[in-house]
Amino acid sequence: MKKNQLLDPSVRSIRTQSDPAIDVVESLSKESEALVELSPSNQSPSDQSVADPSPSDQSVADPSPSPLAKQRLPLIFGGLILVIVGAVFGGRWWQFQQTHAETDNAQIQGHLSPIAARISATVQKVLVKEGDHVEAGQDLVILEDQDLSLKVQMAQAQLANAKAQLAGAQDTVRITNQTTPTQVAQSQAKLAASMAGINAAEAGVAQAEAQIATRQAAITQAQTALNKAAADYRRYNSLYKEGAVSAQQNDTARAAYENAQASLVASTQIVQESEAGLVTAKAQLQTSQANANAASGQVKETQISGQNVTVQQSQQKQAQAQIAQAEATLALAKQQITYTVIKAPVTGDVGQLTAQVGQKIQTGQPLLSIVPLQTDTVYVEANFKETALGRLKVGNLATVKVDAYPNETFVAHVAGISPATGSSYALLPPDNATGNFNKVVQWVPVRLVFDPQADPRHKLRPGLNVSVSVETLRVDTASVEAIDKPPSIQSTSTLKP
């Protein structure tokens, strides 16, 4: 049989290639062909008669291969194929490792916006639910503002008083300039009037304090009546449900309970008004005392050198300062009213909602958080070994695989590399100068940002675990330029190897 007839067609087609592995297979095929040709089963009877002249010669040299050699041929072919496949995949893996840096020590991070109360108040309405999407400027929580309205009214009264004092000071300066000969007499009369005003203001303060004490007692009495009416109403209501009393008696008890509540509210408001009157009386007393002091000084000054105008101008400045202070107090009170409506500072989704209707909150108490899920608000915080740091550059392209979405890949690029390792920022950083030095591979935080169209459906969430693969030989030049340029002049992404 000829050699070309013994070769398999697939082997003959492989011979046209120049791969060294194919040459090895071809040489093994030739050897197997030679073994097959020498075997007795593949020879004709005439060839056997010529090749085997005598039994003694067959015992001396038998060219046919042994069964063990035939069994080894498939194993050899299989081993060669495994070596070739392993070499191909090993080469590709080695090439990939030389051009990529990988890590699974990474998480998605985001800019969470905690929302806290800026005043102490009671929650009146909660307009959102956990997981709702909100826009920037949307109302989230509404607080009660009754006490703040009273503060605004008090601030307005103080401002009006300060303006009146300023007007009086200005008039005094003008009159003093016009009536210099009678300044002494006027100053003495003013001093007497101021002293009378002090006495009247002190009497007003005492009267206001007495009214407060009396009306606080009325509050206590109203509270006692409310407690009694509430107990009567609960008792009549339970008896009415059992059929022991009539509906009229139950309605009477309820009406008494509501009247007691109204009486308590009215008494409380009266006490608040009395307290406001006390504040006004004290302010009037202070004004009278200041006027008395000013009048006494005016008497002395006019008797000596007639410098009343200077003193009155100082009073005018003081009144102007009081106006400024009252305006600031009024502005602060109005600003605090705006704090009762809590708005969303950014667009995002609501999370960590703890606000409840009727809840008494304090200043700085967290109520909820807004989590922006736009692609430009989430990023990856990946920790790479220090051995890979030399190959990483800002702008390197990267692919991100999220554990939550194993069949999807997100495109990103390196936006920044930490100036120090993670252990350097630890609360107790390692001290190699203690003598117990063990060299440990350090981790360096690297920040990656997603491309604008990487997550159009906003599926990425802060806190998700990811795996990162960075192409160390490719740099997104546009992303590098965008770090130092405003968004309006960012150019299209250009890649360079």
Image (cartoon, rainbow, N blue to C red):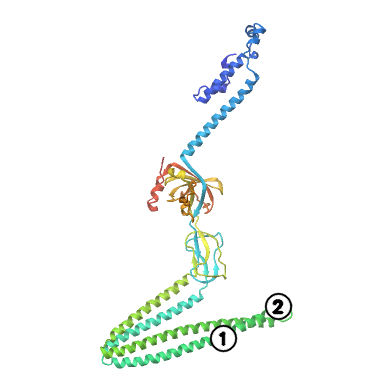
Which residue type carries mark 2?
Ser
On the rendered structure, is 47 left or right of 150? right
Query: Residue at 42% across / 76% down in the picture?
Result: 329
Residue 218, numbered label: 1
Figure check: 39 above or below 210: above
The percent position of residue 32, horizontal first and vertical second, equals: 59, 19
- At 65% from the left and 13% from the top, the residue drawn is 40
Residue 259 seen in render: no
Question: Tag 1, which secondary structure?
Answer: helix
Residue designated by label 2: 238
Query: In the displayed structure, does residue 338 sit left or right of residue 190?
Result: right
Image location (x, y in percent) of residue 39:
63, 14
Q: Please tell me whether residue 283 is drawn above or below residue 408 in the rendered image.
A: below
Asked whether 94 or 405 is in front, the reply is 94
Q: Residue furthest front?
A: 435
In the rendered structure, the answer to whether residue 235 lies left or right of residue 359 reads right
Disc 1: CA contacts within 10 A as few (<14), some (14-19) or many (>=20): some
